[in-house]
């Protein structure tokens, strides 16, 4: 038989919006806010600290690209990396790069007009 766990009531001031957002997430796991807080407390005791890394976010504005994006932009703008090709050449090149399990996909053999019709059919079903 499982031992009865003594519980206590605690009042905590929470951001209303964050609380409701969190409750919606926890509901997907079949638990309430109390369950989630108890899991947090159990992990904090087991780890003898906050059970996840807490740090200030990096200063990043939405329109400032990170280093990886800057490198990709440089590579894309490098004339040695560019090649002018027709749509047919592009599609043939893409077919060469497609993994074997997708080689027989009906989309690979379609021309641009067929792809547009297929997109419209799928997008509005």
Image (cartoon, rainbow, N blue to C red):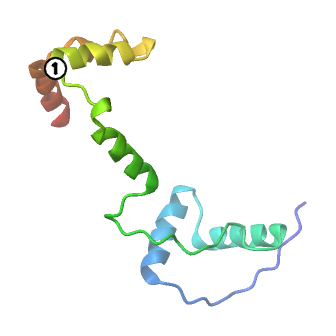
Report the side of 13 relative to 24 (left or right): right
Look at 43% across and 16% down and name the residue there.
99
* Residue underneath mark 1: 87
Up/down of 70 relative to 1, above or below = above
Q: Quadrant of the C terminus?
A: top left
Q: Nearer the viewer, residue 123 or 71?
A: 71
Q: Nearer the viewer, residue 25 or 73?
A: 73
Q: Which image quadrant for residue 26?
A: bottom right
The picture places residue 32, in percent across and down from the top left corner, at 58, 68
The picture places residue 29, in percent across and down from the top left corner, at 57, 56
Q: Nearer the viewer, residue 113 or 88?
A: 88
Look at 14% across and 28% down and name the residue there.
121
SS at mark 1 in the image: helix
Report the side of 67 relative to 39 (left or right): left
Look at 18% across and 36% down and name the residue there.
123
Report the side of 43 relative to 14 (left or right): right
């Amino acid at each position: 038989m499982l031992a009865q766990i003594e519980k206590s009531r605690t009042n905590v001031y929470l951001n209303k919006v964050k609380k409701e957002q969190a409750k919606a997430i926890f509901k997907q796991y079949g638990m309430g806010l109390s369950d989630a807080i108890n899991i947090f407390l159990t992990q904090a005791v087991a780890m003898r600290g906050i059970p996840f890394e807490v740090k200030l976010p990096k200063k990043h504005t939405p329109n400032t690209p990170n280093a990886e994006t800057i490198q990709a932009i440089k590579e894309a703008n490098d004339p040695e990396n560019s090649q002018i090709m027709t749509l047919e050449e592009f599609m043939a090149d893409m077919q060469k790069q497609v993994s074997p399990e997708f080689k027989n996909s009906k989309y690979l053999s379609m021309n641009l007009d067929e792809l547009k019709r297929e997109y419209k059919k799928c997008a509005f079903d």
